[in-house]
Image (tube, grey):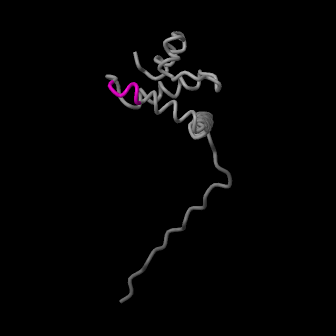
Amino acid sequence: MTIPIRLQPIAEPPDEAVIDGGSIMTLKLSALLLAGSILASATAWAQSADDKKWVNQCLSDNRDAKVAASVVSTYCTCMNGKMSDNETRSITQWEKANPNARKACEQQSGWN
């Protein structure tokens, strides 16, 4: 006795993909976010040894802060970025003489 086997044809994929307008916008937004993330990462890695020294000193100066370490790190990096490369004062000293920069970095880091 033989059992008949019925094979189903495999559907062929369409010749060209159809993407609606919403999908294109989502794709563009995703690409933009990815590019921004890569740029932010590159900026973080671009810190000099001197920048790292000042940021680490700022982190140490603020170790008793009542906010998350990530907030302090973002704040210190922001403050360091606002300072001149020729600055000789620490971030902690510089922030006292530059309240507008301090307020901007507090806001950017979420330290309010």
- Vertical order, 12 against 94 (above or below): below
Looking at the picture, tell me which residue is in the foreground, 10 or 60. Answer: 60
Query: Residue 93, position in %: x, y?
Result: 49, 17
Residue 97 to residue 61: above or below: above
Rendering coords of residue 65 (x, y %): 34, 23
Q: Is residue 6 left or right of residue 49?
A: left
Decide whether the magenta segment is chiefly helix, strand or loop. loop
Q: Which of the two residues, 51 or 31, is positioned nearer the viewer here?
A: 51
- Tell me which corner region of the image, top left, top right, bottom left or bottom right, holds residue 21: top right
Q: Is residue 1 magenta?
A: no
Quarter that holds the C terminus: top left
Q: Residue furthest front?
A: 88
Query: Is residue 5 rendered to the left or right of residue 79?
Result: left
Q: Is residue 96 visible?
A: yes
Residue at 61%, 22% in the rendered image: 87
Q: Residue at x 52, y 28 (%)?
A: 77
> Residue 88: horizontal and vertical position, in percent?
58, 23
Q: Between residues 55 and 107, which one lies in front from this camera angle?
A: 55
How many numbered marks appear?
Answer: 0
Q: Quadrant of the N terminus?
A: bottom left
Q: Which residues are magenta?
A: 60-64
Instruction: Give the residue drawn at x 54%, y 66%.
Output: 10
| Residue sitting farthest toward the bottom | 1
Q: Is residue 62 magenta?
A: yes
Res 37 visible: no
Residue furthest right in the image: 15
x, y percent for residue 105: 50, 19
